Image (spheres, helix red, strand yellow):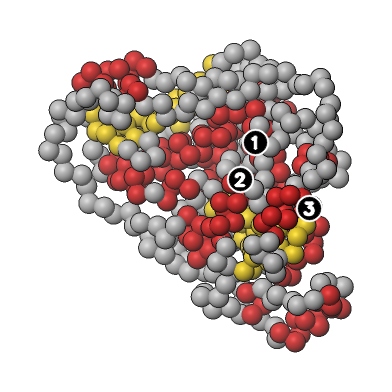
């Protein structure tokens, strides 16, 4: 960003445009200051509780200009820690009010409002950090990835586990050939949401919550505590169940290690489809094409307590020395299992095991070639400032939307296949299931009046 204007000129234009300059102190964004990379970013934060509080903590040393939350209690409590920040209930009004004052936006709302908030900010040229999954629908996800690329913005998806050292060591083992060529991967999580009907009672909405703003682009429905706080993941209008909650975290590892992009086939197995809520248990089978010298891959996802039982039992019989839950593969409630030509590699957030253990006794791991991160949030902050970091070009992050977009699309396609009731032959370039017209209604869904992507 090479544009430079004087502070006096900037202030004058702000007042003339009817901005906030006349009402109080103006915060000049770093692009207008011709900022050095060491300068603080001016950041707006949308969603300040739950993951929002954690993400706010990750950028708290920068200049927090504005805070937005639909819950007045959350907003007031958080604003007390950032007394100079302006507060808003509606992110659309916030972005319009502080557009000329901010460099970047953090989006930590429920899934159904990730896309409209992030898209509005990025169209203004603001860097974006968004919680996972990036969006609620595949179309929204592709839109954000295209915006980030076209506008050359620094972006980061909130897959914080990517910043850990264990994932780096696993990627080095896979890419170093420790288990040979990998054509099969299994990913699972114990997460389970959904399986209920829409409530018939209509209790009063708490006065601190703006229910209309919380609904955002989703279809109108009465307030009920079964949606908020924290239970919205179980409902299709707001989230995508256990797959949406943990898929981006665990599938991140095979995506990184095997250099995956878009699947060509998606098929699901689960209970009867409910029009309102997500399944309590789901199995998804993905097929990915060959990538250069890397072979085609079949990846299977399980949630709700399901696991690749036979493979894990085999791994336990030939591998684990003890039956403690930490080392017995059959007892891992969440994980990733790479099945290679030479052996298997089992991993989760913090553990990794080469199997069978007898075969890998005395194994020397490859040299550590993937640099440790400065931190998931700090990596994005540095990228916003145009800094280059070890292993990354200036302005780049490890989970930029160009990488995490295909990851999120893959996760969401599992939901599309399940809801459409069909195996999908997926054409990623056309954003279309070539064999299933019904899938289109779940790939892209309409917004409520007054909301736009």
Count of residue discs: 3
User: Dots 3 and 1: beta carbons under 8 Å?
Assistant: no
Residue at image location 80% in from the left, 32% down from the top: 223
- Image-based side of 200 in relation to 436, left or right: right
Q: Which residue is mark 2?
A: 50
Residue at the image position 77 percent from the left and 21 percent from the top: 199
Viewer-proximal residue, 216 or 426? 216
Q: Earlier in the sequence, mark 1 or mark 2?
A: 2
Disc 1 + disc 2, Cβ < 8 Å: yes
In 3D space, how far apart are the residues under numbered discs 1 and 2 (Cα atoms)? 9 Å
Mark 2 vs 3, N-terminal side: 2
Pointer 1 residue = 230
Which is more N-terminal, label 1 or label 3?
Answer: 3
Percent x, y of residue 177? 25, 39
Label 2: how many Cα within 10 Å (few below 14, some 14–19, many 20+): some
149 with respect to 344 (left or right): right
When the figure is inspected, residue 1 is found, relative to residue 191, above or below; the finding is below
Residue at far top of view? 272
Residue at 41% over, 26% down: 333
């Amino acid at each position: 960003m090479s544009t430079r204007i004087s502070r006096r000129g900037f202030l004058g234009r702000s007042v003339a445009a009817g901005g906030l300059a006349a009402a109080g102190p103006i915060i000049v964004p770093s692009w207008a200051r011709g900022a050095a990379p060491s300068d603080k970013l001016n950041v707006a934060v949308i969603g300040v509780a739950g993951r929002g509080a954690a993400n706010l903590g990750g950028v708290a040393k920068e200049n927090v200009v504005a805070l937005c939350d639909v819950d007045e209690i959350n907003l007031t409590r958080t604003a007390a820690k950032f007394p100079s920040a302006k507060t808003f209930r509606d992110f659309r009004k916030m972005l319009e009010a502080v557009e000329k004052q901010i460099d970047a936006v953090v989006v930590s709302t429920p899934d159904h409002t990730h896309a409209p908030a992030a898209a509005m900010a990025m169209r203004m040229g603001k860097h974006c950090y968004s919680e996972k999954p990036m969006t609620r629908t595949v179309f929204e996800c592709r839109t954000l990835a295209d915006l980030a690329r076209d506008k050359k913005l620094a972006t980061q998806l909130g897959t914080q586990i990517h910043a850990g050292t264990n994932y780096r060591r696993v990627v080095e083992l896979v890419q170093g050939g420790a288990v040979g060529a990998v054509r099969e991967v299994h990913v699972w999580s114990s997460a389970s949401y959904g399986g209920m009907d829409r409530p018939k009672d209509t209790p009063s909405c708490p006065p601190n919550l703006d229910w209309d703003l919380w609904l955002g682009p989703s279809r109108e429905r009465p307030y009920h505590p079964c949606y908020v706080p924290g239970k919205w993941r179980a409902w299709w209008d707001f989230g995508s169940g256990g797959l949406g909650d943990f898929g981006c975290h665990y599938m991140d590892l095979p995506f990184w290690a095997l250099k995956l992009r878009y699947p060509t086939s998606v098929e699901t197995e689960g209970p009867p489809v409910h029009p309102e809520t997500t399944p309590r248990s789901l199995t998804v089978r993905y097929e990915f094409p060959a990538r250069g010298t890397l072979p085609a891959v079949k990846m299977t996802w399980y949630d709700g307590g399901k696991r690749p039982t036979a493979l894990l039992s085999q791994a336990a019989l030939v591998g684990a020395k003890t039956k403690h839950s930490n080392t017995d593969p059959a007892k891992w409630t969440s994980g990733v299992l790479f099945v290679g030509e030479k052996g298997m590699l089992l991993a989760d957030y913090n553990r990794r095991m080469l199997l069978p253990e007898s075969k890998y006794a005395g194994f020397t791991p490859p040299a550590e070639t993937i640099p440790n991160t400065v931190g998931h949030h700090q990596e994005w902050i540095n990228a916003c400032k145009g800094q280059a970091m070890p292993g990354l070009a200036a302005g780049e992050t490890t989970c930029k939307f160009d990488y995490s977009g295909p990851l999120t699309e893959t996760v969401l396609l599992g939901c599309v296949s399940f809801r459409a009731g069909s195996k999908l032959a997926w054409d990623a370039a056309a954003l279309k299931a070539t064999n299933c017209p019904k899938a289109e209604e779940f790939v892209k869904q309409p917004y409520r009046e007054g909301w736009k992507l």
